[in-house]
């Protein structure tokens, strides 16, 4: 892939005289952010015209959001009628929020129907899907934008500005450690993400955010990847060995889950109960499975080494069972070093609290603290003033929505190239964990090339 700085082929389109016509496919919890924006804050430039899902109950919950904002409900289409929906509702742009392994199917179908696409990260969950998306984009010339909301966090933008301005010189290395706490980390092991076939594992589903940040910060793309990873904490064997496991398959209705700090209690939330419990009769999907149960095929502790086209190196670590949540980044260059420390949750509180009324759900990041330190050669360290944005992902979601749905953008939209560069880092790491060998990213994407 080309370097992560290339955006000219997908500039933000000029505002049309009429709002652009959007459809949302995949109506789970994350998609509510897009549905809400399309029927409230961004109606001057964007209009929700249809919903699509395999589950009608979840679509109905999203249409309740539409009604709550004083609008008429939009048509609901089953997944098998996706192509018909695009044609009948004259859809111009599709927002893809489905299970990761199906992203490529909907992206390619939308592109071939003449639509542009916004997709949740990761762009897809496997190499074949990545190849198909890139081929469809080349074939059609349509836009594919990946919702890398962390790029729009003002703290991360400040890091980008300092590095791009040459304040630390040529980048030689990046160290990046990301910690998910016992509530947030556990949540990936309760739901469909726990199966690598669905999500690609945390190095694809979660770390694609982080790999994209590094690509963007240093203006380069991955070339060679090596990784180790284990299911160290969660899973049936670990639960038994450390005497952490409680005896239940799913938390709802299970007496053994009542005092389990790792259990998710969906019934604590009317919204979650409507979106998940009430929808189970259609597809059998259970959102609250036991994190120490069988069938988990993803890792919870991963270490990755990456060599970039620029020559820079990345050392990356992700742990999904930490006592606190946050991340540390250090970028070392020929003229100095930039260090970022972010605390999103200083410790994990079990049970209910004022900020976490739903037992088991991650705590909101309302008191995120960030410290950015610039260390130039031969000079004392300088603390750079940064302000964490309000709202989800340090304000990143708000700015992302303004860029995707507004008339103008805060910064260029992440493209299919950006999506592939981040995705391929995680996929190459998965392949390295499988084989025990370094992986050439270009050969992973084009083995015959």
Image (cartoon, rainbow, N blue to C red):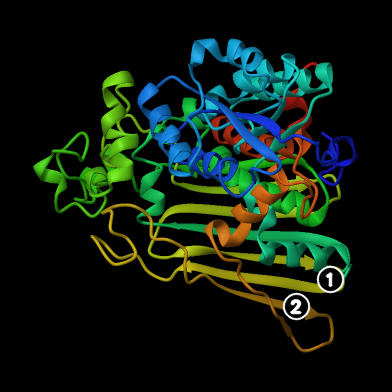
Horizontal arrangement in the rendering, residue 97 relative to residue 189 (left or right): right
Would residue 364 be seen by someone viewing this image from the given angle?
yes
The answer to which of 221 and 11 lies nearer the viewer is 11
- The answer to the question of whether label 1 and label 2 lie on touching residues, with beta carbons closer than 8 A, is yes
Task: State which tag comes first along the sequence, 1 or 2.
Answer: 1
Horizontal arrangement in the rendering, residue 345 relative to residue 406 (left or right): left
Relative image position of residue 24 (x, y in whole percent): 56, 30
Mark 2 lies on residue: 374
Residue at the image point whose x is 42% and y is 71% from the top:
346
Element at label 1: loop
Relative image position of residue 75 (x, y in whole percent): 50, 22
The answer to which of 31 and 133 lies nearer the viewer is 31
Label 1 and label 2: CA atoms lie apart by 8 Å
Mark 1 lies on residue: 168
Q: Quadrant of residue 357?
A: bottom left
Quick check: 239 above or below 324?
above
């Amino acid at each position: 892939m080309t370097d992560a700085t290339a955006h000219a082929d997908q500039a933000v389109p000029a505002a049309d005289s009429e709002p652009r016509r959007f459809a949302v496919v995949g109506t789970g919890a994350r998609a509510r952010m897009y549905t809400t924006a399309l029927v409230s804050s961004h109606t001057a430039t964007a209009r929700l015209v249809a919903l699509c899902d395999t589950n009608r109950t979840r679509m109905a919950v999203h249409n309740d959001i539409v009604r709550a904002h004083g609008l008429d409900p939009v048509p609901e289409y089953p997944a098998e009628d996706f192509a018909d929906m695009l044609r009948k509702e004259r859809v111009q742009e599709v927002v893809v929020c489905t299970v990761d392994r199906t992203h490529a199917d909907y992206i390619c179908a939308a592109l071939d129907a003449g639509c542009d696409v916004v997709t949740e990260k990761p762009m897809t969950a496997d190499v074949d899907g990545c190849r198909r998306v890139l081929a469809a984009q080349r074939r059609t010339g349509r836009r594919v934008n990946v919702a890398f909301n962390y790029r729009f966090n003002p703290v991360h933008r400040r890091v980008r500005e300092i590095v791009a301005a040459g304040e630390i010189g040529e980048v030689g290395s990046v160290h990046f450690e990301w910690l998910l706490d016992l509530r947030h980390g556990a949540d990936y092991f309760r739901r469909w993400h726990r199966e690598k076939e669905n999500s690609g594992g945390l190095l694809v589903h979660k770390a694609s955010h982080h790999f994209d940040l590094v690509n963007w910060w240093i203006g380069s793309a991955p070339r060679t990847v090596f990784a180790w990873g284990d299911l160290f904490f969660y899973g049936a064997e670990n639960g038994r060995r450390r005497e952490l496991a409680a005896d239940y398959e799913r938390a709802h209705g299970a007496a053994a889950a009542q005092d389990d700090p790792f259990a998710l209690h969906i019934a604590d939330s009317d919204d979650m109960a409507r979106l998940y419990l009430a929808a189970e009769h259609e597809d059998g999907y259970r959102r609250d499975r036991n994190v120490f149960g069988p069938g988990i095929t993803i890792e919870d502790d991963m270490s990755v080494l990456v060599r970039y086209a620029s020559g820079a190196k990345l050392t990356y670590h992700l742990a999904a069972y930490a006592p606190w949540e946050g991340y540390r980044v250090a970028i070392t260059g020929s003229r100095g070093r930039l260090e970022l420390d972010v605390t999103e949750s200083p410790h994990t509180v079990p049970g209910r609290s004022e900020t976490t009324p739903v037992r088991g759900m991650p705590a909101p990041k309302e008191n995120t603290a960030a410290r950015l330190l610039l260390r130039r050669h031969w000079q004392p360290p300088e603390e750079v003033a940064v302000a964490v944005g309000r709202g989800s992902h340090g304000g990143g979601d708000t700015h992302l929505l303004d860029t995707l749905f507004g008339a103008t953008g805060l910064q260029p939209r992440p493209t299919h190239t950006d999506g592939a560069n981040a995705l391929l880092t995680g996929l190459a790491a998965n392949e390295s964990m499988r084989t025990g060998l370094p992986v050439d990213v270009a050969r992973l994407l084009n083995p015959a090339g």
